[in-house]
Amino acid sequence: MQHIISVKQLEDKKLLQELFDFATKLKKLSPVEYPKPLQDKIIATLFFEPSTRTRLSFETATQRLGGKIISTENASISSSNYKGETLEDTIRVINSYADGIVMRHPETGSAARAAAVSKIPIINAGDGGAGEHPTQGLLDVYTIYESKGTFDGLKVGMVGDLLNGRTMHSTLQLLSMYDVEFYFFSPKSLSLPKSYLQILKKQGRKFTELYGWDDALKHIDALYMTRVQKERFKKAKDYLAVKDDFILTKSLTRQLKKDAIILHPLPRINEIPPEIDADPRALYFEQARNGLFARMSLLNHLYS
Ligand code: NCD
């Protein structure tokens, strides 16, 4: 049994292809036809931070594959964490109830701490701002693959809070395995941490950092928008200073290629106005739907 703490565990082209193929197969089936690898298994969802898509899609995925869910409503106030219990003790206890734990926690490195004391798989559903969100990375690259059929030769634009956006940190690492060229659009104070630029350099990938919208938009095949992560700012004024810097207006979308795709891990705030939703290139709700199938595919891989 394997933990999924980082996308590093998914950095295997053959494994990714298998996960994509299985997700695509599941998308074509009706729920009565789904395999049941989680029959008699219980998955615990332990979320110390808010979540809509990640938690509900994991809970749906588990039940669609024949498993059952136990959950705390909001682990930071309704688990014993509130009374001062350590994360490690909480994980040890859940080990005697469940067969796997999907967890989200505000501290970077918390999923690795949990895995260190867990005999059942820990799946990281987001650890802090500087951390990772490997299953979001998986569903993001799956959505790009589903739409484009390949990664090689693509130009990917990543926009917004590149400092604190854990989803794009995971997505970027998976994409860096392929011949992808990156364009990073962000306020200077929210630029991509150097450690991720190092990964791209090591892999020999081309990248350009831009601090404003640029006519580079016309080259982009996949535009990955992110929200400015308000909760990661210490001072409100620092958030207010950058929150509106990268809004994808209708006129900006006219610069994008006809077959470009627009992605967003959601939730969006104001960076994609609702009027863009009708644009056939706007795939973010399909991307969220793919979260279910990508997570079913991963759970099937872990528990078959
Ligand atoms: C993201 C997260 O929690 O990191 N949400 C998600 O899982 N789709 C993105 C965000 O909160 O901005």
Image: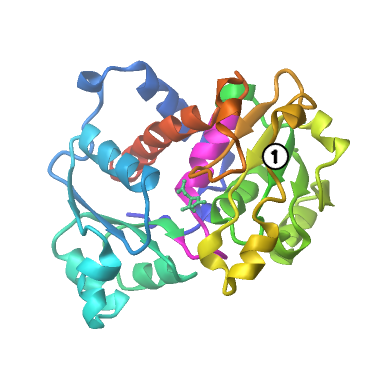
Give the extent of the magenta segment. Answer: 127-144
Residue 153, relative to residue 186: is it above or below? above
Task: From the image, tell me which residue sits under label 1.
Answer: 178
Residue 247, relative to residue 144: is it above or below? below
User: Residue sitting at 56 percent across and 39 percent down?
Assistant: 264
Q: Where is residue 165 in the image (x, y as percent from the top left)?
A: 58, 56
In depth, the one of 286 and 242 nearer the eye is: 242
| Viewport quadrant of the C terminus | top left
Q: Position of residue 302 (x, y in %)?
A: 34, 45
Q: Position of residue 225 (x, y in %)?
A: 63, 42
In depth, the one of 274 and 29 nearer the eye is: 274
User: Residue sitting at 42 percent across and 28 percent down?
Assistant: 23
In depth, the one of 3 and 156 nearer the eye is: 156
Helix, strand, or loop for circle 1?
loop
Q: Where is residue 268 in the image (x, y as percent from the top left)?
A: 53, 43
- Left or right: where does residue 150 sit relative to residue 202? left
Q: Is residue 269 magenta?
A: no
Q: Quadrant of residue 125?
A: bottom left
Examine the rendering and report whether any part of residue 249 can be seen. yes
- Classified by dominant secondary structure, the portion drawn in magenta counts as helix
User: Residue sitting at 75 percent across and 61 percent down?
Assistant: 198
Amino acid, disc 1: Tyr
In depth, the one of 39 and 265 nearer the eye is: 265
- On whether ligand 1 comes within 8 Å of the CB at mark 1, the answer is no
